[in-house]
Image (tube, helix red, strand yellow):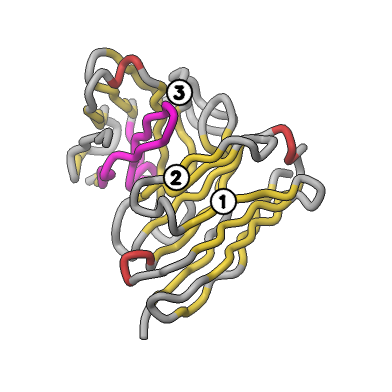
């Protein structure tokens, strides 16, 4: 079955960096756009970024543009999110998900990023 | 930037019909889909951008999207449907609405 497993979250100091990973299985990873969405504690969903199947097209939310970089390795069935210049406002659960013609599904279980001194 | 507006909360009695709206400028010209999120769980797509249900989603979930408003309709609402619901618009970027907490009481 389709499975997405995020990793790489944790506690980081303000101004620090973190790299999230998402391991995909159960489908042909290179056929699909992929996205990252985050959810701050007790708040709603916020789309972060998506990347085309080849990796040639990338879009970012204004809130992370210039600080976050999405990438993928189709040979490794993996999606990444490099996060730099982190601030308290980036504290959230980060979800990796597959984009399909129907919408975004499925979603991973998420990895928690906490930015605090 | 594009914004989507949802009511913060909607209440419905078991067996009745719940309607959750999502408003945005010319939303009907964009793809829109709906997600359900229960406490402590990841979001789940319940209505696609073609107003179709993904596999495993009950028939009681339906929707529409025209003008400036998309609507998620849950017919014969059950207690298991109590959750947060988010609309999302797709164009060159993706935007989520603020979410609606559906209470079944």
User: On the image, numbered disc 2 is attached to which residue?
Assistant: A60
Q: Chain ID for label 3?
A: B
Give the secondary structure at mark 1. Answer: strand
- C-beta proximity under 8 Å, tags 2 and 1: yes
Q: Quadrant of the C terminus of chain A?
A: bottom left
Q: How many other residues sit within 10 Å of disc 2, few (<14), some (14-19) or many (≥20)?
A: many
Q: Position of residue B52 (x, y in %)?
A: 49, 20
Q: Which of marks 2 and 3 is in front?
A: 2
Q: Where is residue A2 in the image (x, y as percent from the top left)?
A: 70, 44
Residue at horizontal 48%, vertical 30%?
B58
Q: Distance between the residues labelled 3 and 1?
A: 24 Å
Instruction: Classify A2 as above or below A95.
Output: above
Instruction: Classify A42 as above or below A73.
Output: below
Foreground residue among B98 and A81: A81
Foreground residue among A22 and B21: A22
Q: Chain ID for label 1?
A: A
Quick check: do tags 2 and 1 share a chain?
yes
Residue stretch in magenta: B77-101
Quick check: do tags 2 and 3 share a chain?
no
| Residue A106 visible to an observer of this rendering | no
- C-beta proximity under 8 Å, tags 3 and 1: no
User: On the image, numbered disc 1 is attached to which residue?
Assistant: A70
Q: How far apart are marks 2 and 3 (CA)?
A: 21 Å
Tag on residue B49? 3
Q: Position of residue B27 (x, y in %)?
A: 29, 21
Q: Quadrant of the N terminus of chain A?
A: top right
Q: How far apart are marks 2 and 1 (CA)?
A: 9 Å
In primary-sequence order, the first of circles 2 and 1 is 2
Give the secondary structure at mark 2. Answer: strand
Foreground residue among A57 and A38: A57
Q: How many other residues sit within 10 Å of disc 1, few (<14), some (14-19) or many (≥20)?
A: many
């Amino acid at each position: 079955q389709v499975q997405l497993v995020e990793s790489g979250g944790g506690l980081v100091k303000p101004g620090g960096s973190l790299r999230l990973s998402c391991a995909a299985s159960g489908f042909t990873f290179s056929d699909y756009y992929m996205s990252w969405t985050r959810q701050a504690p007790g708040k709603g969903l916020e789309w972060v970024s998506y990347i085309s199947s080849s990796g040639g097209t990338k879009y970012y939310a204004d809130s992370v543009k210039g600080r976050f970089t999405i990438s993928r390795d189709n040979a490794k069935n993996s999606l990444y999110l490099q996060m730099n210049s982190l601030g308290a406002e980036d504290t959230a659960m980060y979800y990796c998900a597959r984009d399909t013609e129907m919408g975004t599904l499925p979603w991973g279980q998420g990895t928690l990023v906490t930015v605090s001194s | 930037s594009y914004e989507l507006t949802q009511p913060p909360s909607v209440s419905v009695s078991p067996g009745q019909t719940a309607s959750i709206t999502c408003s945005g400028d010319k939303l009907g010209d964009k793809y829109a889909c709906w997600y359900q999120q229960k406490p402590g769980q990841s979001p789940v797509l319940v209505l696609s951008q073609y107003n179709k249900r993904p596999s495993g989603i009950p028939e009681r979930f339906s929707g529409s999207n025209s003008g400036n408003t998309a609507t998620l309709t849950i017919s014969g609402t059950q207690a298991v449907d109590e959750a947060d619901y988010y609309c999302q618009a797709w164009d060159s970027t993706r935007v989520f609405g603020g979410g609606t907490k559906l209470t079944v009481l």
